[in-house]
Image (cartoon, rainbow, N blue to C red):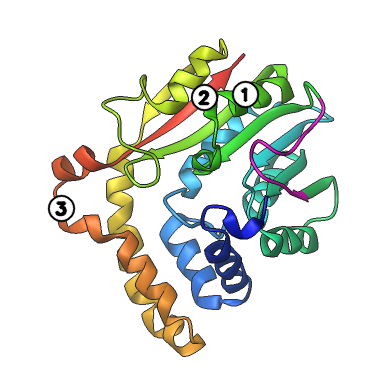
């Protein structure tokens, strides 16, 4: 497949080039989300810290991040757990940065959801934070993830509806939930829609504080994008939850 035909490919190449050089964006992420993972969305440190309890505290632990971006989230998890980290992303710019930043017990590959392979039962934890909308066949991709996951492993997913993925009435009838059931995978799910709504305010306030820095760097368009991403702050939570939903799924074989 031609990369330029992939969803948001050009935008993400530009985004990760900006994230690598922009002190404004790095400072914004740390203030808005609690840590700079080069986030494009609503994955804050609190959500990432939830993953730590599922990472075994022993030697030879392997973690895979689906759509790993520039690897900063994996780097944080490795720092906290000493795990071996693996990630793939379709962005050449992101993977180049990840490979430059992390060397020890780290593997980063260019790859596309549904078109990349790993050994069976390789990983203790597999992570997808806001990346499963790239799967053209969710059921087939979940089957692939199931194959990669160790017997007692965990598949941790941050899943958002209402933007790329259509909104459904509840967490048990989402496209992901249906794919999990079809692959005989069990899950626990937490609705974090309200926390996400609150994060909108934090994100906008932090963006406003960094406006001058963005503009001084020549990255004023990214400030505009951040403000656009928080437009729902002008609506009540009741209005917001009719349009958007965000869940954390903890999934097992």
Above-or-below relation of 234 to 177? below
Judge the density around disc 2: few (<14), some (14-19), many (≥20) Cα neighbours within 10 Å.
some
Residue 156: percent from left, percent from top:
56, 30
Judge the density around disc 1: few (<14), some (14-19), many (≥20) Cα neighbours within 10 Å.
many
Magenta stretch contains residue 110 = yes
Residue 88: percent from left, percent from top:
70, 46
Q: Which mark is residue 154?
A: 1
- Callout 2 touching callout 1 (CB < 8 Å): yes
- Callout 3 touching callout 1 (CB < 8 Å): no
| Left or right for 183, reference 229 | right
| Left or right for 171, reference 135 | left
Q: Main secondary structure of the magenta part?
A: loop
Residue 71: percent from left, percent from top:
68, 53
Q: Which residue is mark 3?
A: 235
CA gap, disc 2 and disc 1: 7 Å
- Callout 3 touching callout 2 (CB < 8 Å): no
Above-or-below relation of 246 to 232? above
Decide which of 42, 244 is in the foreground and name it: 244
Q: Which residues are magenta?
A: 109-119
What residue is drawn where x is 81% and y is 47%?
107
Q: Which residue is mark 2?
A: 250
Decide which of 128, 85 is in the foreground and name it: 128
What residue is drawn where x is 22% and y is 57%?
233
Above-or-below relation of 89 to 231? above
Decide which of 158, 50 is in the foreground and name it: 158
What residue is drawn where x is 35% and y is 61%?
203
Residue 188 visible (yes or no): no
Residue 144 visible (yes or no): yes
**SS category of the residue bearing label 3:** loop
CA gap, disc 3 and disc 1: 36 Å
What residue is drawn where x is 32% and y is 74%?
208
């Amino acid at each position: 497949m031609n990369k330029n035909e992939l969803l948001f490919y050009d935008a993400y190449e530009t985004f990760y080039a900006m994230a690598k050089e922009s002190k404004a964006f790095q400072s914004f992420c740390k203030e808005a989300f609690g840590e700079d993972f080069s986030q494009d969305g609503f994955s804050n440190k609190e959500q990432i810290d939830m993953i730590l309890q599922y990472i075994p505290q022993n030697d030879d632990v392997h973690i895979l991040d689906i759509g790993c971006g520039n690897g900063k989230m994996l780097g944080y998890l490795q720092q906290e757990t000493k795990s071996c980290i693996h990630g793939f992303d379709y962005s050449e710019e992101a993977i180049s940065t990840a490979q430059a930043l992390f060397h020890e017990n780290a593997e980063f590959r260019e790859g596309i959801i549904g078109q990349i392979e790993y050994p069976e039962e390789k990983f203790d934890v597999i992570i997808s934070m806001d990346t499963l909308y790239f799967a053209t066949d969710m059921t087939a991709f979940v089957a692939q993830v199931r194959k990669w996951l160790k017997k007692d492993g965990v598949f941790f997913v941050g899943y958002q509806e209402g933007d790329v993925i259509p909104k459904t009435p509840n967490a048990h009838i989402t496209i992901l939930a249906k794919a999990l059931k079809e692959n005989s995978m069990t899950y626990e799910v937490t609705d974090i829609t309200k926390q996400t709504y609150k994060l909108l305010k934090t994100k906008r306030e932090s963006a406003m504080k960094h406006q001058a820095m963005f503009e001084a760097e020549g990255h004023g368009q990214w400030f505009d994008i951040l403000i656009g991403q928080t437009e729902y702050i002008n609506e009540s939570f009741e209005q917001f939850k009719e349009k958007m939903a965000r869940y954390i799924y903890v999934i097992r074989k």
